[in-house]
Image: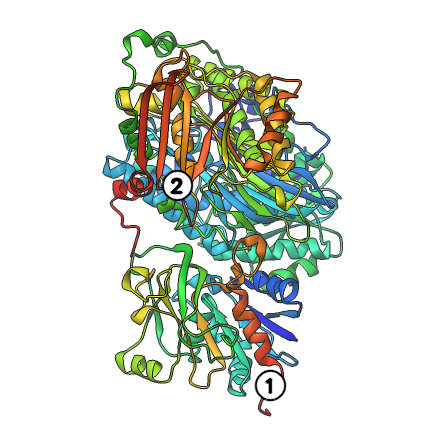
Amino acid sequence: MTEDTKTLPPTNISPELIKQHGLSEEEYQQIVTHLGREPNLTELGIFSVMWSEHCSYKSSRVHLKRFPTDGPQVVQGPGENAGAVDIGNGLAAVFKMESHNHPSFIEPFQGAATGVGGILRDIFTMGARPIALLDSLRFGELDTAQNRHLLKGVVSGISWYGNCIGVPTVGGEITFNDIYSKNPLVNVFCLGIVKKDRLLRGLAKGTGNQVLYIGAKTGRDGIHGATMASDSFDDASEKKRPNVQVGDPFLEKLLLEACLEFLEQDLLVGIQDMGAAGLTSSACEMASRSGTGIELDVAKVPRREPNMTPYEVLLSESQERMLLVAQPGKEDAVLAVCRKWGIDAAVVGKVTDDGLLRIREGDQVVAEIPAPAIADEAPRYERPSAPPQYQEILQALNLDALPDVKDPADALLQLLASPTIASKQWVFRQFDHMVGTNTVVSPGSDAAVVRIKGTNKALAMTTDGNSRYCLLNPYMGGGLAVAEAARNLVCSGAKPLGATDCLNFGNPERSDIMWQFIMAVEGIADACRAFEIPIVSGNVSLYNETNGLSIYPTPILGMVGLIEREDDITTQWFKQHGDAILLLGETREDIGGTEYLKVMHSREQGMPPWLDLEREQALQQCVLTLIQNGWVQTAHDCSEGGLLITLAECCITHPTTQFGAQITLSQERLRLDALLFGESPSRVLVSVKQEHLGQVQRYIQDLNRDVPMSLLGRVTDTEHMDVTVNASKNQTVYHMKLSLSDLTAQWQNSLSQQIGAELSP
Amino acid sequence: MNIGIIVFPGSNCDRDCAHVISEVMGQKAHLIWHQDTSLKGMDALILPGGFSYGDYLRTGSIARFSPIMEAVIDFAGRGGLVLGICNGFQILLEAGLLSGAMLRNKNLSFICEDIYVRVVNSDTPFTTQCQSGQVLKLPIAHADGNYYTDPLTLSTLQANAQIVFRYCDKNGNPIISSNPNGSIDNIAGIRNAQGNVLGLMPHPERCAEVILSNQDGRLIFESMLSSIIGKTLLPV
């Protein structure tokens, strides 16, 4: 222990204080062991945030080891600000997804905005210029004013921040279920591009190197934000509004440009975003990763308000701040770049070799903690888990007692108007999805596609996750999320390269929630391993619970794929009259957990569709090869709403034009509702030019692995979607002919009508 | 040709404009920092879109005090071509190079989508490659594009053919329902009295390449570049 520690302020830690800091008595004893003494208040605060669930992953870390994280394409796996994969041409795609659920419920506008700000910083601290954002959002149904308020607030917060900083929001998905009424989910994905050999990392190497603070001044906002995000809500959560941070996208834009200039001039040893737990976590993580120590003087930290204590400065979550270590002799160049962009910057400390995080205020040492103790040696819990008793009731669905669909046309129209399926134009119109001039496929197809300037390549990106499937069978739900994400990329002409995940769950101290978590993680891990898609980054959000009610288990997969040639870019809408329509994959009796069952029977029950990993992989390889051979006009993943919704989307979602379709289905032994609206996975609807039909059919017949194929009909230039169902040859049991304008009216306007907004001015 | 693109803190379409000028049009793009004071050697200028100074206070109101703006005003005064896109248009209004002001969009939301404009005046240096009455599909992306001016100024703009683009439907009819933001007289873009300064809300740089499925914006850059040839600026 150094001489300075003698001047540490006295400790006076009561059991109440420990509890207020969200620490258990056992955890407190561990702190004492780590320090070899009682902590003072500042140190207690540091441990409190760093050992919070949000920062330490203490309940999840042991399980996350199951994820595959390696592969020849992986440039950076988990553990850094973001992951990175090789995309050729000397470039890497850097990406990550993060949740901002708790703040977005308390203050939707700033909560969502700072979610965007946080994930952007994670990307550009790696030296990458962010080129795309996607949002995965979950809300309660729009029949209550509060849910409409949350949706509007979140959308305008994302719009405000993303538009201003000039990174396009190119896609994502939104679904609605009342389980999210008191716990909406805001998961934001960001991707950037960097030269592979210029990737920056969060390192604090080189004893004596100076540590600089740049960006916004530190204020009292967001203190204990990370602790708030590690607790469940009750009716008094309103009072936590001051814990929500406030964003400044303009400042972040300056910070972004300055950071990329540091990279260009090669000025840094390492850099780290001050996100959750602010200055404390960035300093500890940088030191811990590098096996060094850091000494900081809080008196030198630029401040927004007077009389802040070291405790407040260290735990503030003021946004738009970075900590960096300059290369020796290049501090002045760093400061010059900051002056150019008008950003506050100060030398606040130095790298040491003693492995300690030492905080001074002027001459006085106010805290001294071994860096690994807070960053890496946080408690880890293997919390008890057990399937809930209600699981069997959830999974029981007696199909014999469920009447088959009477009026499929009506069901189709109702499903199209379900906000989960309906057009999200009201949302995407508020996001700048074009800035950067890379967006080749705008929001509204299976995946967003951005080109990579200077190459002939493009990247496809998607976010997916069906929480109802996960509720009914978390293992299957996890795998289905991976499968759907990969399928969406493949349908866009891309080979999946890597994934990131946000694992949104309830209270991990409940054994049923922990069981959901473990099973979902296993499902994701097994599917990723089968498809050889490594998970390179991600985050976990637990305690999504209010008044004892937890959300459905909601793992969201963000996935990135590479399109080797621009010609391979494929979209979900029909292109040409006369093209043949084919269904690849098999339709089974998968009614459990479907959107159809929820909308038409108000039931969220049954077993989710069964995923066969081998079949899925065979299908995806087949579709990608067909696309790369230039034979596919349209490819659309069959998912929520089933085959008829998929077909309707192919007909009406083209940005500028529409096509009709005429198909005939064979019912065989299936229920009609399963045939039309069932959600069997591993299915893709494609359209091909008549001149390619023979080649496509021969190719599939010659495959070693079985990919079921049925020729359904053709794209028409009529104004109708025309569907015939035959029981056996020529014996028609059902026929529908719906006008495209009726389908469009249901699909196009439903969301804006429910929000009470007008689409036109 | 040398095209200067002014970079204000918060500009975010500067690099998109530079990409079109250099990679699509094959000319030299120069990113000019707002604290510079010289525009020596530039043949034309672009004030790009974005959120200069975060749009804090009012769009364009702080950027117009940037040191470079004196040089921009001087350049325009000597007949140099100045194109202001979106935030650039807003800055030109605040700087007094164009008349009028911007209000919040009528629906109070940011709007990003493809719209149609009618080329009302094809006799400007920015529209020589367009036909009069031609309909262009261009994207907009703004929250403050609701152009407004007083009736007297409006009649002057109309009388002098200073209205260059009007929001219209697919067939070229400038009807109210085709106006995304509520701008007066469906105005999407105007020029100054001399004709060498143009401001427009839509983003031509976002639709100038085959890969982006729309090349209508290219006409505006082609017009501007062809108008530069043989043009000499008035002496300082």
Does residue A39 show up?
no
Badge 1: few (under 14), some or many (20 or more) residues near its Cα, within 10 Å? few
Q: Are marks 2 and 1 on the same chain?
A: no
Residue type, mark 1 in image: Lys
- Chain ID of residue with mark 1: B
**Which quadrant would residue A643 be assigned to in this image?**
top left
Residue type, mark 2 in image: Ile
Identify the residue under disc 2: A652
**Which quadrant would residue A436 be assigned to in this image?**
bottom right
Q: Nearer the viewer, mark 2 or mark 1?
A: 2
Q: Nearer the viewer, residue A243 or A27?
A: A243
Give the percent coordinates (x, y) of residue A345: 59, 57
Q: Nearer the viewer, residue A232 or A92?
A: A92
Q: Nearer the viewer, residue A187 or A703?
A: A703
Give the percent coordinates (x, y) of residue A729: 41, 16
**Element class at badge 1:** loop
Badge 2: few (under 14), some or many (20 or more) residues near its Cα, within 10 Å? many
Asked if residue A284 is positioned above or below residue B40 in the image, the reply reads above
**Element class at badge 2:** helix
Asked if residue A167 is positioned above or below residue B221 in the image, the reply reads above
Residue B235 in the figure: left or right of residue A315: right
Residue A265 in the figure: left or right of residue A446: right
Tag 2 near tag 1, CB within 8 Å: no
| Image mark count | 2
Asked if residue A314 is positioned above or below residue A511 in the image, the reply reads below
Give the percent coordinates (x, y) of residue A69: 65, 27
Q: Nearer the viewer, residue A22 or A724?
A: A724
Residue at 43% over, 81% down: B192
Q: In the drawing, what numbered circle is on residue B231?
A: 1
- Chain ID of residue with mark 2: A
Does residue A58 show up?
yes
Give the percent coordinates (x, y) of residue A346: 60, 56
